[in-house]
Image: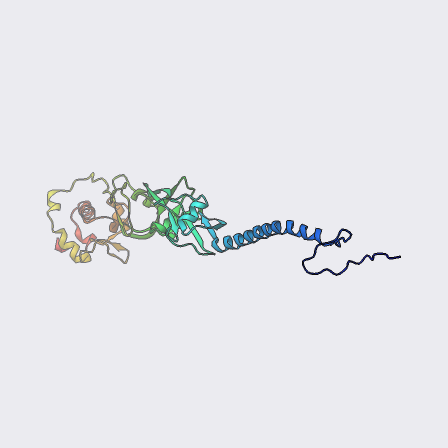
Amino acid sequence: MYSPTLESPAREPGSQLSGWEHPVEKPAEAPSRLRALVRPWLAVLCAAALGASVGVVTGLGLASEVTLDVDGKLTTHRSFAADVRGALEGAGVPYDQRDMVSPKPSTEVDDGMTIVVRHARPLTLNLDGTSSTHLTTALNVQDALEELKMNPNKLQLSTTRLRQIPVEGFKLNARSERKVTIVAGSMRIRTTTTGRTVEEVLEQSNIDLGESDTVSPGLSTFPPEDTVIRVKPGLPPHTIPISADVAALNWPALAKCESGSDLKLASGGRFGLYRFTVKAWRVVGGEKRPIDWPESEQTYRAQLLYQRLAGDWQRAWPKCGSHL
């Protein structure tokens, strides 16, 4: 008996399937459809990832790492700004024309750049009793003084040199060190002082003034560098009058013969114009030494001695008394 086989007969090109012929199913057809659905989403994800990577690379390429030194405080920032001005604005650092910015705000930003900002702050300086206010971008007292062209080594300060100056301002008291000379009688002193007045300088040098002493410059005067302070002792009281006959004698001739008219002569225990001994000087009321006094005082005491000796000049000036 005839049985049809399961194999399909060969078909001529363009022929139709017969009723008993069935096409063979293809199992791979379902995965193909899945791939068709997944491929668009993969493309989208890849594109997004690629875009993000490009964005990161691009961002890193445009950003510059800069260090900000703002009033001594260091911070690091990444900036996309083209210049220093933009970098400071991006970091929220304010400044104005009084402040110091380095490099200049218009400078192009480079990777690794350090930008320095020093905000101006008021410094009230009381120097030797005179007050003045200055704007400074220095962070401490020493730098501020150097900025003002002052030498901190020659100043006596009310605080340490490294004292920080806050942005709101600071008050500094200072005294300058100066070299001055004191001339008092036969004494000459060269000294360094911070005294604000001549009176303070004399006190620092332990110079005691008599009631009638005169000082030049005046006691309340400020003594600048190389000032010469002259102290002239006031004359002791002239209580004993000199007779007209004695005053009329040739005292300049006696002084020339005795000392060569040298007010400051000090030789062999004798002093001044008339070569007084200390004992003779005391007898006629002289104070200190003859050489500590001007010509008028030395002459007055010589006249008193002449009167005390009743004109016996040979006892006082045996070699020169005849010149009177």
Left or right: residue 164 versus residue 49 is left
From the image, which quarter does the N terminus lie in?
A: bottom right
Q: 295 above or below 9?
A: above
In this picture the colour scheme is rainbow
Q: Position of residue 222 (x, y in %)?
A: 28, 44
Numbered label tally: 0
Left or right: residue 249 versus residue 265 is left
Question: Camera-side residue: 31 or 272?
Answer: 31
Residue at 17% from the left image edge and 51% from the top image edge: 313
Asked whether residue 254 appears in the rendered view, the answer is yes
Q: Position of residue 137 (x, y in %)?
A: 38, 47
Left or right: residue 233 versus residue 98 is left
Question: Camera-side residue: 224 or 87?
Answer: 87
Asked whether residue 154 appears in the rendered view, the answer is no
> Which residue occupies the extreme right position in the image?
1
Left or right: residue 288 versus residue 104 is left
Q: Position of residue 35 (x, y in %)?
A: 66, 52
Q: 132 above or below 81?
A: above
Residue at 36% from the left image edge and 50% from the top image edge: 147
When asked about the image quadrant of residue 129, the answer is: top left
Q: Position of residue 244 (x, y in %)?
A: 11, 43
Residue at 72% from the left image edge and 60% from the top image edge: 11
Question: Camera-side residue: 187 or 297?
Answer: 187
